[in-house]
Image (cartoon, rainbow, N blue to C red):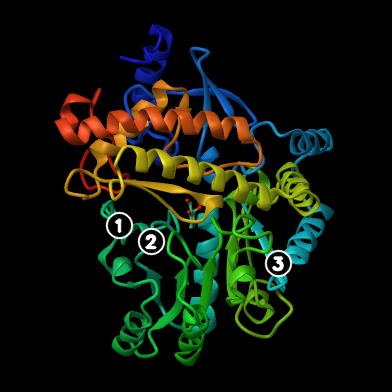
């Protein structure tokens, strides 16, 4: 094996698999998502670098599933958290930090007429759905089929290939439309008159909205009495400081943020129009909605992290830097792809601030075996790259080192295309998270 793990690390991995289903608390970090040579654990990080339990150093991409936008152990955030920790993290009444954090978010995202914080993106999206259902008195939810993830809750997981344990009645409540295809949403509204409570989508993912698409989708949603929800978990603080809603000039009734909000700390937010959001409070005459309320929901140190992170975004060219680093990486990868004759086989997708890559086989079909070969060759060269999502801490030198690694990795990719992937695959291929069987 190219990155042999020490006996101690191998023992840790075995023990983790015995004690923790899947060996990890987050599926996307699991063993099955990475080539066998990947470090089974990451012990620590600094900036864009991480070290495994054997002391090997890597440049990392993805950064905590896109949560760590500024960098690992980023001093202004860590210091704000440490200061707050000394004053206590959870009281019997709210901390003024809740208001400060909400005001800061509102100053950055003006469509946030009201804001409620929680810990995970899933909870924020779940809250949006409960509000929309209560507001409309309808049960059904229309989600964009081209966007891979919205929530860990039954309503969404029931739509995936891993829907064991989710009642059929719950699954039937969710229907799907296609991105940039207004007719597919029109058809859903026609099929379920006055049935759909809300339309849930990312404003964009790897495909940009066609001119007028989001505006027309919003008008169609409202014409059918439904609520529009933009999930900005990925686009928020990344497409633009004000999110994708700012870039495209279209706001939704409700929007959700998480990930980049607190540089890896557990903070998410549901925000949007007062008319809907206030149903979660008690300053109204309508039936109340139980909206996002948990014991740990507003821990003060995590709010301190969110405040420090948003302040840093506001005062420094963070988003601009993400685009610039991504553009440098994209240009370098494009050169390596061209030099190896890999057009149509290896492709970078998405905005420069949020680059993903596609790996295709000789027939130009998506291939987990080729994804594994590419990741394995990057790992050999000290780069963990399940995606090419950059952070503010990725310097030009890190990008250039990565581009050199890509250039070499793609030579192997080329040979694997010519000679067959089996000859170059060092271990079993990676697998998608959502699959029915092991
Ligand atoms: C677009 C989108 N929405 C919601 C979520 C759920 O967020 P969390 O994992 O914080 O619950 C994710 C997570 O990957 C996401 O990418």
The quadrant in which the C terminus is found is: top left
Q: Secondary structure at mark 2?
A: helix
Residue annotated with mark 2: 156
Query: Of callouts 3 and 1, which one flags the residue occurring earlier in the amino acid sequence?
Result: 3
The picture places residue 260, in percent across and down from the top left corner, at 62, 49
Q: Nearer the viewer, residue 217 or 268?
A: 217
137 with respect to 392 (left or right): left
Q: CA distance from mark 3 to mark 1?
A: 31 Å
Q: Which mark is residue 90?
A: none
Q: Secondary structure at mark 3?
A: loop
| Residue with the most extreme front position | 339
Q: Look at 60% across and 43% down and name the residue there.
A: 325
Q: Nearer the viewer, residue 339 or 26?
A: 339
- Residue 281: quadrant of the picture: bottom right
Disc 2 packing (10 Å; few <14; some 14–19; many ≥20): many
Asked whether disc 3 touches disc 1, contact meaning CB atoms under 8 Å apart, the reply is no
141 with respect to 218 (left or right): left
Query: Of callouts 3 and 2, which one flags the residue occurring earlier in the amino acid sequence?
Result: 3
Label 2 near ligand 1 (CB < 8 Å): no
Asked whether disc 1 touches disc 2, contact meaning CB atoms under 8 Å apart, the reply is yes
Q: CA distance from mark 3 to mark 2?
A: 26 Å
Residue annotated with mark 1: 160
Asked whether disc 3 touches disc 2, contact meaning CB atoms under 8 Å apart, the reply is no
Mark yes or no: residue 290 visible. Answer: no
Q: CA distance from mark 1 to mark 2?
A: 7 Å
The picture places residue 387, in percent across and down from the top left corner, at 44, 42
Residue annotated with mark 3: 109
């Amino acid at each position: 094996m190219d990155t042999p793990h020490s006996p101690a690390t191998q023992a840790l991995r075995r023990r983790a698999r015995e004690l923790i289903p899947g060996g990890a608390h987050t599926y996307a970090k699991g063993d099955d998502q990475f080539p066998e040579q990947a470090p089974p654990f990451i012990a620590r990080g600094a900036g864009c670098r991480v070290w495994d339990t054997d002391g090997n150093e890597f440049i990392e991409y993805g950064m905590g599933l896109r949560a760590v936008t500024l960098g690992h152990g980023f001093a202004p955030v860590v210091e704000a958290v440490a200061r707050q920790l000394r004053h206590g993290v959870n009281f019997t009444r709210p901390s003024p930090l809740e208001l400060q954090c909400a005001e800061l978010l509102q100053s950055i995202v003006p469509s946030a007429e009201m804001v409620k914080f929680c810990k995970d993106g899933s909870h924020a999206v779940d809250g949006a759905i409960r509000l929309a259902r209560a507001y409309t008195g309808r049960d059904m939810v229309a989600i964009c089929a081209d966007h891979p993830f919205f929530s860990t809750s039954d309503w969404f997981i029931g739509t995936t290939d891993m829907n064991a344990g989710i009642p059929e009645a719950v699954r039937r409540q969710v229907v799907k439309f296609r991105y940039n295809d207004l007719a597919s949403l029109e058809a859903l509204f026609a099929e379920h008159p006055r049935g759909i409570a809300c339309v849930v989508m990312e404003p964009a993912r790897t495909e940009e909205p066609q001119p007028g698409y989001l505006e027309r989708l919003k008008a169609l949603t409202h014409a059918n009495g439904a609520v529009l929800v933009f999930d900005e978990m990925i686009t928020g603080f990344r497409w633009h400081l004000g999110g994708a809603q700012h870039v495209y000039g279209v706001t939704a009734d409700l929007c959700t943020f998480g990930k980049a909000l607190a540089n890896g700390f557990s903070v998410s937010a549901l925000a949007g129009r007062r008319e809907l959001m206030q149903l979660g409070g008690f300053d109204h005459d309508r039936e109340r909605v139980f909206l996002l309320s948990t014991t740990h929901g507003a821990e003060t140190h995590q709010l301190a992290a969110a405040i420090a992170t948003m302040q840093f975004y506001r005062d420094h060219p963070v988003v601009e830097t993400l685009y610039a680093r991504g553009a440098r990486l994209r240009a370098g990868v494009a050169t390596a792809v061209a030099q190896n004759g890999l057009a149509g086989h290896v492709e970078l997708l998405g905005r420069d601030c949020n680059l993903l890559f596609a790996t295709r086989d000789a027939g130009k079909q998506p291939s987990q075996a080729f994804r594994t070969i590419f990741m394995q060759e990057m790992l050999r060269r000290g780069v963990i790259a399940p995606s090419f999502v950059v952070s503010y801490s990725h310097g030009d030198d890190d990008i250039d080192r990565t581009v050199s690694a890509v250039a070499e990795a793609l030579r192997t990719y080329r040979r694997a295309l010519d000679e067959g992937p089996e000859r170059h695959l060092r271990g079993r291929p990676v697998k998608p998270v959502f699959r029915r069987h092991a």
